[in-house]
Image (cartoon, rainbow, N blue to C red):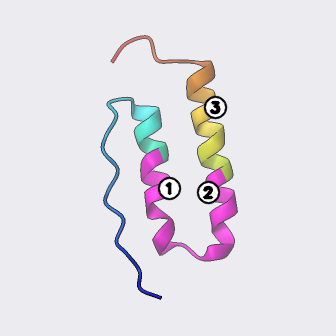
Amino acid sequence: MTEVPVPAPMPTGIDAVDRVLDLVAGLDSRPLEEHAAVFEEAHAGLRHTLDNPPTSQ
């Protein structure tokens, strides 16, 4: 199977969202066993941002 490189995520300008994108983008360097926990952390981070949107950028 040939792996296709995934481009780096485009910054959104929202720090909390950009941190989540960077976290998920780094999955390829982490063991498969850690992926589920990273996705759970990403989901929690995005949910928190949606529930508490930043007031200014």
Task: Say if the magenta span includes residue 10.
Answer: no
Q: Distance between the residues labelled 2 and 1?
A: 7 Å
Amino acid identity at mark 1: Val
Q: Distance between the residues labelled 3 and 2?
A: 14 Å
Q: In this view, does 50 lie above or below 4?
A: above
Residue 39 screen position, x and y as percent: 63, 53
Q: Name the residue under label 3.
A: 47
* Residues rendered magenta in the picture: 21-39
* Mark sitting on residue 24: 1
Amino acid identity at mark 3: Arg
Residue 45 screen position, x and y as percent: 59, 38
- The residue depicted at 56 percent of the width and 27 percent of the height is 49
Q: Name the residue under label 2.
A: 38
Q: Mark 3 or mark 2, which has the lower sequence index?
A: 2
How crowded pointer 3 is (Cα within 10 Å; few <14, some 14-19, many 20+) is rated as few
Magenta segment, prevailing SS (helix, strand or loop):
helix
Q: Mark 3 or mark 1, which has the lower sequence index?
A: 1
How crowded pointer 1 is (Cα within 10 Å; few <14, some 14-19, many 20+) is rated as some
Residue 34 screen position, x and y as percent: 65, 68
Helix, strand or loop at disc 2?
Answer: helix
